[in-house]
Amino acid sequence: MKLRKLAHSRTGDKGNISNISLIAYRQEDYPRLVEQITAERVKAHFREIVHGEVVRYELPLLGALNFVLYDALGGGVTRSLALDKHGKSLSSSLLDMEL
Amino acid sequence: MASISVKSIRLGSGAGYSGDRIEPALALAENGRLDYLIFECLAERTIALAQQQKAGNPNSGYDPMLVKRMKALLPICHKNGVKIISNMGAANPVAAMEETARIARELGLKGLKIAAVTGDDVLEAIEGGDYRFLESGLPLSKLEGRLLSANAYLGAAPLVETLENGADVVLTGRVADPVLFTAPLIWEFGWDMKDYRLMGQGIVLGHLMECAGQITGGYFADPGYKDVPNLAQLGFPIAEASSEGDFTITKLKDTGGQVTLPGCKEQLLYEIHDPANYLTPDVIADFTGVTMEEIARDVVKVTGGMGRPKTGKLKVSVGYKDGYIGEGQISYGGSGALERARLGLEIVRDRFRLTGQEFREVRFDLIGYNSLYGNRLAKGSPREVRARVAGRTDDPETAAAIGNEIETLYTNGPAGGGGVTKSVQAVVAVQSILIDESLIRIKNHYTQT
């Protein structure tokens, strides 16, 4: 099953660092996200784009995870060569991961 | 100002960025029963660009939309007693103040007190200093001769002072975005800036509100999964805050969009790294205790923001010249589109090698869906592909060569290449340093109509 069925997501950027939230629609699905969507898996998923570490933060009260992706935006919005300089579209790719 | 009973105020968010829609702000000013209407308009590098403008003309350097926004909003805000707070001062808050006063006088609006906050510009104070960039670790001294701007993210104190002095319109340069919202909370409720629970909860409010439509259904819709009504008439948010720190987020009834739990959760984490340590000039905010509850349709209640004492350091955005980006694009369609687009990029790569063009960095992309034939005529897999080359150079001539090589594919490349675009852009990049807050010299300015 695609992650998109259980969770939603939004990407933000600060400099060359991207953060992608992953939020369970239903609180009862949150433990599954915690168990399966690890920082290692997310790093592997984005390996062609993200060159630095991936750190995961847990927010159990909100049923949310926050992934912080370092060296992820080709230098950041002010100097990236990419079409999507903010990396705004990264959240949609995260939701295509399989559970 | 100190009052024993619980009091509440209403803050509207009128813009999430400089070019944002104006009608939603007008609707808020007219019908929102607001005390304050707040406009966050200053992106990371905007101030560096504005600084360049100011160097050419000392009366410029403020937000390009200031005049249009003020002309539209001043009359309604004046009529309804809504105060305006904004970072539209950009690189020149004093000129923004004078221009706003000129517009107010032109519109016959009497008795308006307009304030400007300066002191965020620390370029002189840091020049020659021993600083390293947080992002790259490079020393600031490496950029000698290329520095354009250095602006510290200020805290709420100077804004609070302008409100205390009766300002109806407050224009700043760089301040931490949520501070535009915490300043009126601190002033109206007499909050102690060392009460870190209240300050942390105030940052939660500011953070949720600062991107305007992003909490009322913007940047959220995903058809079939997350549907949002009437995004063409998206309403901007209102926060109703109590002196105890609790607040609700809502929007006007007859507007598009929605205020829901999932949307508010997404925005809470937007541009956040460690949610327990969100560094701001006045407080280290902690979002991990935040709870949200949908208490009515389009009304979400937010509680539980916390905080710890500030670090005493301020983040400074340093803008500098960073060479040029050259770009070119060309489209191929129908069966074999992908193969022809790939061949086109191969040819451009060979041309760069043969003509000895070297780039600091270059990328090759393949883009596309239905720009050539509409949906019905599109065939093949994929239906169309747009080849794109972008590269970083030190000089504009080399940057121009990129688009030119793409353009020569018209007559020298694969069959059926069309729709070439090319561009050269001077890059103003931004990185950050930390400075001690004692380096800041704040000055508030006032004028009256």
Image (cartoon, rainbow, N blue to C red):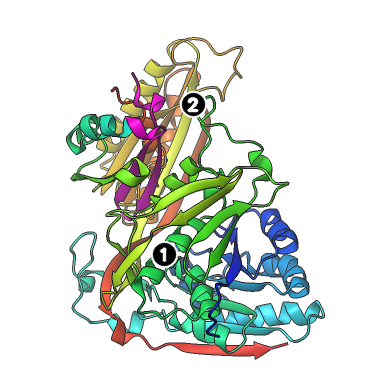
Looking at the rendered structure, the kind of residue marked 2 is Ser
Residue B282: in sight, yes or no?
A: no
Q: Chain of mark 1?
A: B
Query: Where is B229 relative to B163, above or below?
Result: above
Could you tell me which secondary element the residue under label 1 belongs to? helix
- The label on residue B201 is 1
* Residue depicted at 40% across the width and 22% down the height: B341
Q: Residues within 10 Å of mark 1 (few under 14, many from 20)?
A: many
B100 and B311: which is toward the camera? B311
Looking at the rendered structure, the kind of residue marked 1 is Gln
Could you tell me which secondary element the residue under label 2 belongs to? strand
In what quadrant of the picture does the C terminus of chain A appear? top left
* Residue depicted at 42% across the width and 33% down the height: A25
Where's residue B154, x and y in %? 40, 76
B146 and B103: which is toward the camera? B103
User: In which image quadrant can residue A4 be found?
Assistant: top left
User: In which image quadrant can residue B286 be found?
Assistant: bottom left
Determine which residue is flagged by label 2: B331
Query: Where is B214 relative to B199, above or below?
Result: above
- Residue stretch rendered in magenta on the structure: A1-28
Apparent side of residue B270 relative to residue B13 in the rendered image (left or right): left
Apparent side of residue A86 relative to residue B273 in the rendered image (left or right): right
Where's residue B44, x and y in %? 42, 62
Where's residue B197, x and y in %? 36, 69
Apparent side of residue A56 relative to residue B178 in the rendered image (left or right): left
Asked if residue B191 lies in the magenta stretch, the reply is no
